[in-house]
């Protein structure tokens, strides 16, 4: 896995998250990493989003979901979520 050096202490070799960084700039990089797990524009329920996030960090997928929304990487309306930001490989 080709991760930025700053993220390596927070992500295991299998891609799962060890812990959520306290520093905002590092947390933003981690959120960008997570956002890549969602296909842009695909609508998902809260349960589906939590399942994706739980695969990365089973301890607190709800906080990750909130962080992603606050960072404008996921959007939510009427209980439906979709990826609305982050980098996209082309």
Image (tube, rainbow, N blue to C red):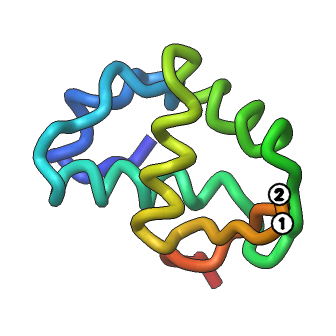
The answer to which of 84 and 66 lies nearer the viewer is: 66
Image x and y of residue 52, in percent? 72, 37
Question: Which residue is the extreme one toward the front?
Answer: 78
Q: Is mark 2 on a helix, strand or loop?
A: loop
Mark 1 surroundings within 10 Å by alpha-carbon count, few (fewer than 14), some (14 through 19), many (20 or more): few
Residue in the picture at 43% in, 61% down: 32
Give the percent coordinates (x, y) of residue 31.
Answer: 42, 54
The residue depicted at 17 percent of the width and 46 percent of the height is 5
- Picture layout, residue 19 above or below residue 86: above
43, 89: nearer the viewer: 43
Secondary structure, mark 1, is loop
Q: Residue at x 26, y 49 (%)?
A: 27
Say left or right for 46 vs 34. right
Contact flag, marks 2 and 1 (Cβ < 8 Å): yes
Q: In this view, does 33 lie to the left or right of 35?
A: left
Q: Mark 2 points at which residue?
A: 79
Percent across and percent down for residue 15 are 50, 31
Q: In which quarter of the image is residue 71?
A: bottom left
Dividing the image into 4 quarters, which one contains the N terminus?
top left
Q: Name the residue under label 1.
A: 78
Q: In this view, does 10 lie above or below 34?
A: above
Between the residue at mark 2 and the residue at mark 1, the CA separation in whole angstroms equals 4 Å
């Amino acid at each position: 896995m080709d991760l930025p050096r700053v993220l390596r202490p927070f992500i295991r070799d299998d891609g799962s998250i060890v812990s959520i960084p306290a520093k905002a700039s590092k947390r933003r990089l981690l959120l960008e990493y997570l956002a890549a797990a969602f296909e842009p524009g695909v609508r998902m329920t809260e349960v589906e989003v939590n399942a994706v996030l739980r695969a990365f960090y089973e301890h607190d997928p709800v906080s990750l979901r909130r962080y992603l929304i606050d960072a404008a990487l996921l959007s939510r309306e009427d209980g439906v979520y979709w990826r609305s930001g982050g980098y996209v490989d082309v």
